[in-house]
Image (spheres, helix red, strand yellow):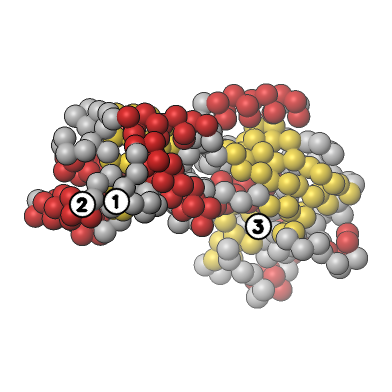
């Protein structure tokens, strides 16, 4: 895939609601297989489409891209050593040593692209329709479900759920909501009504840690207000919580967009004892057993250097 092909596919993935990161080479020092403007898409599961560099760069970029997807924060990577900048590393840059067999270096910008925030609104009132319209204005994906149709399967750990059934099946709808473990659960109603609903669910055996997460009344406290202003108050609270990090911008640990709570395969890593590079702790890492310990290497050259004098390198071996 060319750089432009990567951008076109990134647009398609974003429209499909997938989580991924785009890695772009913004600086290079030869020899390096990565070129200025080289791009790649890295999925939450670590799959790569495109090109940003060879065996030395790719494992590090994959690891950092997956972390960026998890925490929602971009990062600037220097794959090489601080010598390329005379030892003065720009603030915010992450330096990662790469291949011992090349003096090349890459600077790679990794930017996460996450699905639009998902707001599930349970109930059918003028307020719920106003809330859905307002959420759409700021680019969120808002859905409305009737209380009798809503189930825990409609949301996941990234969703925000507002239960606004107004006395028509509040208990059942809220039980489905807390069971799903979303990032936010709010109940539209008074403190008194909320206490009654939560008390009923506690008697039914709903765990206290799930009920403690319910915000009631949902939204900023504006006092008695019309339904449109209630919608504004709820959306304002959600925006504030996301800005504060209480509702994470990235993906919950062990999840991946588009697959509910399906765990993404974790890739074990180790440190090459010769050059210090982070490598995959699998067959691609050229494993070698020495005195009961398995070592992994970035390239055949490092493995050969270890084999020639294993005692020298084994003493300084570290694990990731």
Of labels 1 and 3, the one closer to you: 1
Label 1, on which residue? 217
Q: Residue at x 41, y 46 (%)?
A: 233
Give me the C-alpha separation between circle 2 and circle 3: 51 Å
Of the image marks 1 and 3, the number of the one nearer the N terminus: 1
Give left or right: position of 59 versus 189.
right
Give me the C-alpha separation between circle 1 and circle 3: 49 Å
Q: Which of 59 and 134 is in front in this view?
A: 134
Residue 195 x, y percent position in the rendering: 18, 55
Q: Is residue 80 visible?
A: yes
The residue at the far left in this view is: 203
Of the image marks 2 and 3, the number of the one nearer the N terminus: 2
Dot 3 lies on which element?
strand
Residue 155 x, y percent position in the rendering: 34, 37
Residue 139 x, y percent position in the rendering: 53, 33
Q: Which of 262 and 129 is in front in this view?
A: 129
Mark 1 surroundings within 10 Å by alpha-carbon count, few (fewer than 14), some (14 through 19), many (20 or more): some
Q: Residue at x 9, y 55 (%)?
A: 203
Q: Nearer the viewer, residue 176 or 276?
A: 176
Q: Which of 317 and 300 is in front in this view?
A: 317
Label 3, on which residue? 278
Label pair 2/3, CB-CB below 8 angstroms: no
Dot 1 lies on which element?
loop
Mark 2 surroundings within 10 Å by alpha-carbon count, few (fewer than 14), some (14 through 19), many (20 or more): many
Label pair 2/1, CB-CB below 8 angstroms: yes
Give left or right: position of 25 versus 295.
right
The mark found on residue 194 in the picture is 2
């Amino acid at each position: 895939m060319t750089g432009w092909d990567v951008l076109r596919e990134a647009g398609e993935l974003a429209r499909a609601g997938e989580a991924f990161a785009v890695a772009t080479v913004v600086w290079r020092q030869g020899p390096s297989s990565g070129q200025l403007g080289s791009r790649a898409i890295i999925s939450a599961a670590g799959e790569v489409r495109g090109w940003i560099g060879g065996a030395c760069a790719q494992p590090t970029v994959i690891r950092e891209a997956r972390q960026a997807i998890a925490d929602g924060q971009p990062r600037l990577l220097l794959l090489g050593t601080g010598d390329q900048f005379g030892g003065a590393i720009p603030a915010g840059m992450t330096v990662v040593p790469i291949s011992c067999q090349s003096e090349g270096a890459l600077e790679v910008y990794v930017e996460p692209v996450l699905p639009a925030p998902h707001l599930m609104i349970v109930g059918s009132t003028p307020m719920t329709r106003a809330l859905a319209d307002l959420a759409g204005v700021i680019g969120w994906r808002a859905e409305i479900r009737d209380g009798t149709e809503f189930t825990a399967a409609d949301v996941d750990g990234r969703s925000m759920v507002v239960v606004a059934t107004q006395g028509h099946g509040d208990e059942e709808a809220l039980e489905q909501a807390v069971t799903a473990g979303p990032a936010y659960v709010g109940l539209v109603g008074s403190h008194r009504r909320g206490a009654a609903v939560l008390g009923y669910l506690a008697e039914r055996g709903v765990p206290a840690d799930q009920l403690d997460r319910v915000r009631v009344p949902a939204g900023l406290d504006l006092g008695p207000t019309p339904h449109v202003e209630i919608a504004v108050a709820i959306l304002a609270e959600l925006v504030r919580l996301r800005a504060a990090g209480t509702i994470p911008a990235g993906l919950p640990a062990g999840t991946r967009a588009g697959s509910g709570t399906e765990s993404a395969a974790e890739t074990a890593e180790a440190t090459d004892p010769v050059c210090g590079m982070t490598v995959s702790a699998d067959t691609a890492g050229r494993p070698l057993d020495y005195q009961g310990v398995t070592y992994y290497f970035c390239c055949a050259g490092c493995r050969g250097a270890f084999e020639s004098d294993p005692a020298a390198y084994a003493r300084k071996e570290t694990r990731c």
